[in-house]
Amino acid sequence: MYSLGGTLRQLANILVAEYKVRLMAGWQYRFQQSLGLMGLMFEAVIYLVVWTTVAESRGGEVGGFTTGELAGYYIGWMFVRNMTTGWSPQWFEYRIREGEFNTALLRPIHPFFPDISHMMAGKTTWLITLLPSMAILAWIFQPQVTFVAWSLIAMAPALILAFLLRYTLMYVWALTAFWTTRITALFELYFALEFFFSGRIAPLALLPEWAQTIARYLPFPWTFAFPLELMLGRLTPNETLFGFAMQALWLTIAVIAVRAIWRRAVRHYSAVGG
Amino acid sequence: MGPGSSHRTSIMKSAISARNLSKTYIVHERSGGLRAALRGVFRREKKEVEAVKSISFEIQPGEIIGFLGPNGAGKTTTLKMLSGLLHPTGGQGFVLGYEPHKREKDFLKQITLVTGQRNQLVWDIPAIDSFEVNQAVYDIDREQFRRTVDEYIELLELQELVRKPVRQLSLGERMKVEIAAALLHRPKVLFLDEPTLGLDVPMQRRIRRFIADYNKQEGATVLLTSHYMSDVQALCKRVIVIHQGEILFDGQLSHLVQQFTGYKEIVVEPKERGIDLSRYGEIMGEDAGRVSFRIPREEVPAVAAKLLADIPMFDLSVEEPPIEDVIERVFAGGNIETAS
C-alpha cells in the first residue's frame, strides 16, 4: 500500500536524483548552452532597443514605461524567460524516434515528473551564464527598477507557478507528437498568440486596451508577464491575487488536459508500436 | 469478459501467460514518386499487418525461455506486448498476474526489458550516477542498492566502466552496464531482446553467465530472444519458435532438433582414404579424411552398423545437426511440414 507521505517522499527523491544527473550531463554542454543563451539575449536586446527608440521619440516614455524601466523590464525578461521554458513537440518527437520513450514508459513513474527535473537542471546551467550577462546589460542600459519587498517575495511562487503552467501547457502540445507531426502548424499559431499576449514581445501595458482585456483571460500572461511585473514591483495587491487565481485556474485546466491526452496518447502509441 | 476460472488459475501460477495474443498494425503506404506523394496528402492507403497471430504459451516461474524467429517474426512485438509497451489487438497477456498494457506501478517494479535500442543510462555521465536515478525511481532500499551495485560490478567486471561517461564505452561494455542498470531493482521477470547482439565471444559468455546466475539466485523468469544459438543452448532448456507471427514449436530444445530434422549426421574416419562411400548415404562433406553423411533418423543404427562392418576405420560418430542449421531450415520453411 502507498501512503501519501511515502509517495511524496519518493517523488521528491526521484526529482532530486533526476535533477542531479541532468545537471551533471548538462554541465558537459555548458559551452553549447552559452551559445543558446546568446539567442535569448539578442531577442531581449532587440525588443529593448526598439521600444527605447519608440519611447525616446515620444519624449522618453511609452505606455507608462520610461527608457530605464524598459531596460529593467527586458533584463528581468531574460531571467523569467529562462525560468519558464518548456518542452516542445519537436523534442518529444525526437524522444519517440530515438526510442527513449520506451524507457520512460516502463518506469514506475509518470515521465511528466522526472521531465520537470530535467528542465530545472537545464535552467540552472543557463543561470550560471545568464546572471553575469544580465549584470553586463544592466551596466550598459542602466535600468530603473523600484523593488518592493512584498512583491519580490510574491514573485517566487508566481515564478514557480508560471513555470509549472507553461511546462504543463507545452506538455499538452508535446503529447500531440504521439499522433502526428502535422500539428506543427497549429503549434506555431499557438506560439504566435503566446508571443503577443504573454508580454514577451512588449509589456502588456503597451498593447491596445482590447488586447489587454483578452490577455487577462488567456493563460499566456500568467506564464510570463505576471512574475516579471511582480519582480519589477508594478502590480497592486489586488492584481497580484487575481494573477495567482488565474495561475491556479489555468494550471488545473492544463493538468486535466495532460491527464486526458496522456491516456489517449499512450493508447495510440501502444497501438502503433514504439 | 474476464478469463475463466481454470485460465485464472493458470495465470496465477504462470509467470507469463499468453492466450491467443495478437497484434495487428495498421500501416500507411504509398508508391514512390511525387504524384503518389501528392495523392497521399488527401487519401492515405492503409494496410493491416498481422505481426503476431493468436499465439498462446505459459511460462512457469524460474524458466528461461529462448524465443526464436527470423527478423520480422513477431518476437519483439510479443516482448513489447508482455512488457506493457504495446496494447494487444486480440487475446490476453498476463505477467505475474498483471495485464501488462495497464502498466501498473507494482507490475513495472517487478519486470525489466533490455533491448539493444533501450538506453536507461544518461549518455554524458558515468553509469554509476545514472544508477542513483534507478535507486530513487524503483525506491530501492539504500543498503540493498549498495550491495546490488557492488555485486553486479564484481560479477560483470564493471569496476572501471561504471566510472567512465557512457558515451566512451564500447558496445559490449555499454550493454554490460545497461544490463546492470536494468536489474538493479531485482526484477522477477526479464525480457531480454538480443542482449548479446554485436558483442564479441568473451563478452557474450560473461553476459550469459550473469543471466544464468541471476536466474538461479533470484528464481527469475527470463524470456530471451537471440540470433546466437550459443546463447540459447547455454541458457534455455525450452524454446518457443515463432515464424510469421505464429508459433511453430514450443518445447525442449533437444526436441526441436528431432522434430524439425528427420536426419542425423554420421561422421566417419576410414583407415583407407579415397574409397567410394556414396552407397551408404548422402555425403555432406569431406575434410582431412573425415567424411560426413546425412542419414534419415530411423536408418542411423543400420547404416552405422553396416559402415562399421564393411569399412576399417579410426572413428565413427553420430551427431545431431548443428542447431543453427536446424533453425535456418525451419525458418526457410523447408522442413516445416515435419512439425506436428
Image (cartoon, rainbow, N blue to C red):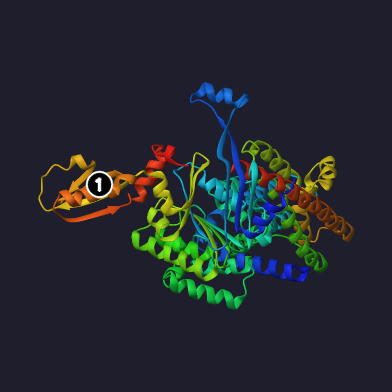
Place of residue B161 in the rendered image (x, y in percent of width and height, measured from the top left): 43, 68
Residue B283 placement: quadrant: top left
Place of residue B91 in the rendered image (x, y in percent of width and height, measured from the top left): 65, 44
Q: Which residue is located at x 56 percent, y 47 percent?
A: B78
User: Quarter holding the N terminus of chain B?
Assistant: top right
* Tag 1 subunit: B
Q: Give the farthest residue toward the bottom.
A: B143
- Which residue is more in the foreground, A197 or A170? A170
Image-based side of A235 in relation to B181, left or right: right
Place of residue B23 in the rendered image (x, y in percent of width and height, measured from the top left): 60, 41
- Asked if residue A232 can be seen in this view, the reply is no
Q: Residue flagged by tag 1: what amino acid is it?
A: Val
Residue A58 placement: quadrant: top right
- Which residue is more in the foreground, A53 or A63? A63
- Mark 1 closeness class: few <14, some 14–19, many ≥20 residues within 10 Å: some
Image-based side of B267 in relation to B33, left or right: left
Image-based side of A184 in relation to A59, left or right: left
Q: Which residue is located at x 21 percent, y 48 percent?
A: B306
**Total number of numbered discs in the rendering:** 1
In the depicted structure, whether residue A178 falls above or below residue B5:
above
- Which residue is more in the foreground, A67 or A129? A129
- Which residue is more in the foreground, A56 or B306? B306
User: What SS does tag 1 mark?
Assistant: helix
- Asked if residue B38 can be seen in this view, the reply is yes
In the depicted structure, whether residue B195 falls above or below residue B145:
above
What residue is pinned by disc 1?
Answer: B303
Q: Give the farthest residue toward the right.
A: A238
Place of residue B39 in the rendered image (x, y in percent of width and height, measured from the top left): 58, 22
In the depicted structure, whether residue B92 falls above or below residue B113:
above
